[in-house]
């Protein structure tokens, strides 16, 4: 049980005076801590010890704290100093604990009024990490993606890349979007992008977010739909959140991204306290070591606005060049207490204005280890600069590390195998045909329609094979090998229809061709055409008879349609060949009458085309006449039949034996009036007798 104490008049000790060996221990009051504290100094000068002493005092005093450590060493030491009455208050967030990942979904349960803040905070984090690759288009698309996901309950950061690659998933998200501007982007703008432009636009986002989510260290944390750590609850119930973001274990970029998102979530949780009276808001202390890794624009906003929400910051880093101008201005303009260890010459020049005239840049550069210059906030007023020495470690080791880790795992972590199974199910890959999905992806990438492969079993060989064509399973189906074997068997007379097996959708044998035939009429089908049963023998006979009658009826309909087309086209009456040609009755007529009759029939045959099936009669007759014209044009002069000429044509003289042949260049003028083929340059003409 936490000890009872006067919180408002409480003093957190962290140093002692060193003027004239005074050695007077001093600290900072609660209300002065609400104006934040800034610590800067080179590595190894004593910054970490100062932070540890303050953290442990807050823990022993029953306060809520969050310590973000990008190295991991400090947090691991603090685990061994937790008093027994606070073991159940510790939430240990260690991404390197791969078997028991903690759930942290930054998109989980965000109030409508804070959705734009979440999106803006994430943009700031991503922009800081990928500063050299960042672009306005990238920010525009990613921001609309995050805002769309925030409107869909159960969304995680895994949905970012899926929004660009899975159209069905994207449609399901768009249906839930309530922001009209965001919805317009996806429905009107993004949908209008060409495939090439869309690919180029989202490539950078997919690249960077994909790198972040491809690691199981991060994916198993951010992919959990429900966060197992509730930052608002931790703040209000004064729990202890220890965050181990060791760069050496999870990677620098992963450390910066997780830390940035966590700090952004802490800021939002603090702002949600607007629903409480100010007197009911309990102080929560946020310690951030090497805070330049997470110092975004939103971090600057925390410094300027967090005091009224009782979120008190203690930030530390090594040198000021690590900060952007905006963050540096926010720090120097908003922190109440400034503590400076030994720094380099550029920082000493920068800090001179804060500590002059008491201390010069040379004094700051030459500070001994564990010695500081500081400006302390005392009852809301900054003190003149003075020097001090930091305190040595003040807490006792309780050996609580193993207990803290075990309790925290039980309460806030999940089993890795369970999380990965949920992720697999969410992606739609669980139990899916991987080859089919890959084929669909390849087809999409090549701009073709995705072809689904269907599995069959060869009716002759019994071997399974797959092709991207849906075949009628009511008939025998052969692989390429089976086709050759059946062809050879039929050729040499060894084909046995009893060995030709027809298989069902589940590739189970139904019967042989000898029993069922090759027309597929044995099958009972549903409305979709799928086989759902097998007919009895009598039904098969009736259906086959009906099929033959139907085929005959369809042929008669085609003939009737051909007659109608001729009539509409105004063609002469056609004599359509019947299916069975009738034999005319023998009639004894005089020979002269028979000859005249045959002559008339021949004239009608020339004038009247014969229709067979649905042949286009007019086109056939036109083609025949054009062919005859071409033949007449190709016929050589002098080879026409005498009776076909209207008048005899005079013969042209043959060229003399010694006379040179006339060429096209000398005969063009004479040949212009001559009908027929025109000569090419250099071509030789020899005229024969007419």
Image (cartoon, helix red, strand yellow):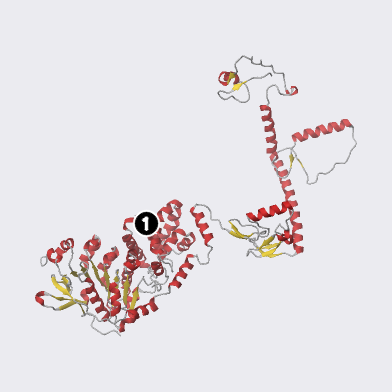
Q: Residues within 10 Å of mark 1 (few under 14, many from 20)?
A: some
Q: Foreground: 49 or 223?
A: 49
Compared to residue 288, the image places residue 185 above or below, namely above
Residue 267 screen position, x and y as percent? 31, 69
For image coordinates 69% across by 33% down, the residue present is 625
Q: Foreground: 209 or 235?
A: 209
Compared to residue 157, the image places residue 134 above or below, namely above
Let me know if residue 61 appears in the view.
no
The residue under label 1 is: 138
Seen in the image, is 505 located left or right of residue 542? Answer: left
Q: Foreground: 590 or 491?
A: 491
Seen in the image, is 339 located left or right of residue 234? Answer: left
For image coordinates 57% across by 58% down, the residue present is 453
Q: Residue furthest left?
A: 20
Residue 266 screen position, x and y as percent? 32, 70
- Quadrant for the C terminus, please: top right
Compared to residue 553, the image places residue 97 above or below, namely below
Quadrant housing residue 199: bottom left
């Amino acid at each position: 049980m936490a000890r009872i104490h006067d919180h408002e008049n409480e003093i957190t000790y962290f140093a002692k005076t060193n003027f004239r060996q005074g050695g007077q221990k001093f600290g900072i009051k609660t209300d002065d801590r609400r104006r934040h504290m800034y610590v800067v100094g080179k590595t190894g000068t004593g910054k970490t010890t100062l932070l540890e002493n303050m953290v442990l005092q807050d823990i022993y005093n029953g306060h809520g704290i969050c310590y973000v450590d990008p190295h991991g060493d400090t947090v691991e030491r603090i685990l061994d100093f937790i008093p027994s009455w606070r073991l159940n208050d510790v939430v240990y967030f260690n991404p390197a604990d791969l078997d028991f990942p903690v759930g942290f979904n930054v998109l989980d349960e965000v109030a409508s009024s804070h959705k734009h803040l979440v999106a803006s905070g994430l943009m700031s984090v991503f922009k800081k990490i990928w500063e050299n690759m960042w672009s306005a288009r990238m920010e525009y698309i990613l921001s609309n993606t995050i805002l769309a996901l925030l409107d869909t309950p159960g969304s995680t950061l895994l949905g970012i890349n899926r929004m660009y690659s899975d159209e069905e998933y994207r449609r399901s998200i768009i249906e839930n979007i309530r922001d009209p501007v965001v919805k317009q982007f996806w429905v009107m703008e993004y949908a209008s992008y060409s495939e090439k432009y869309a690919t180029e636009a989202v490539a950078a986002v997919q690249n960077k977010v994909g790198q972040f989510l491809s690691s199981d260290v991060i994916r198993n944390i951010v992919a959990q739909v429900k966060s197992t750590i509730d930052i608002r609850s931790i703040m209000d119930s004064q729990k202890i959140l220890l965050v181990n973001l060791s760069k050496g274990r999870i990677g620098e970029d992963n450390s910066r991204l997780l830390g940035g998102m966590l700090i952004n979530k802490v800021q939002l949780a603090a702002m949600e306290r607007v629903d409480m009276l100010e007197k009911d808001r309990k102080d929560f202390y946020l310690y951030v070591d090497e805070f330049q890794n997470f110092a975004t624009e939103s971090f600057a906003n925390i410094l300027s606005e967090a005091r009224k929400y009782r979120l008190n910051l203690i930030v530390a880093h090594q040198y000021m060049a690590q900060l952007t101008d905006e963050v540096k201005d926010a720090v120097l303009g908003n922190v109440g207490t400034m503590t400076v260890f030994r720094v380099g010459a550029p920082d000493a020049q920068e800090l001179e204005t804060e500590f002059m005239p008491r201390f010069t840049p040379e004094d700051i550069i030459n500070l001994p280890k564990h010695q500081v210059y500081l400006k302390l906030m005392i009852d809301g007023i900054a003190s003149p600069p003075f020097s001090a020495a930091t305190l040595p470690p003040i807490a006792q080791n309780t050996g609580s590390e193993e207990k803290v880790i075990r309790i925290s795992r039980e309460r806030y972590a999940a089993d890795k195998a369970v999380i990965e199974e949920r992720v697999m199910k969410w992606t739609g890959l669980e139990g899916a045909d991987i080859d089919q999905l890959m084929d669909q992806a390849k087809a999409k990438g090549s701009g073709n329609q995705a072809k689904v492969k269907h599995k069959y079993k060869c009716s002759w060989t019994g071997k399974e094979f797959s092709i991207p064509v849906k075949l009628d399973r009511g008939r025998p189906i052969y692989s390429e090998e089976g086709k050759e074997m059946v062809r050879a068997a039929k050729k040499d007379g060894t084909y046995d229809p009893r060995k030709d097996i027809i298989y069902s959708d589940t590739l189970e044998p139904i019967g042989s061709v000898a029993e069922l035939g090759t027309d597929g009429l044995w099958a009972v089908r549903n409305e979709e055409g799928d086989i759902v049963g097998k007919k009895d023998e009598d039904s098969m006979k009736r259906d086959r008879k009906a099929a033959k009658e139907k085929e005959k009826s369809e042929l008669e309909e085609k003939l009737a349609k051909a007659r109608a087309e001729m009539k509409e086209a105004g063609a002469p009456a056609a004599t359509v060949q019947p299916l069975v040609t009738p034999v005319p009755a023998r009639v004894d007529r005089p020979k002269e009458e028979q000859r005249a009759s045959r002559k008339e029939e021949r004239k009608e045959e020339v004038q009247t085309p014969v229709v067979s099936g649905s042949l286009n009669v007019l086109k056939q007759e036109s083609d025949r006449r054009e062919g005859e014209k071409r033949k007449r044009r190709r016929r050589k002069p002098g080879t026409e039949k005498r009776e076909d000429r209207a008048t005899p044509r005079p013969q042209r003289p043959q060229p003399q034996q010694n006379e040179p042949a006339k060429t096209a260049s000398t005969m063009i003028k004479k040949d212009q009036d001559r009908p027929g083929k025109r000569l090419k340059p250099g071509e030789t003409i020899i005229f024969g007798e007419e």
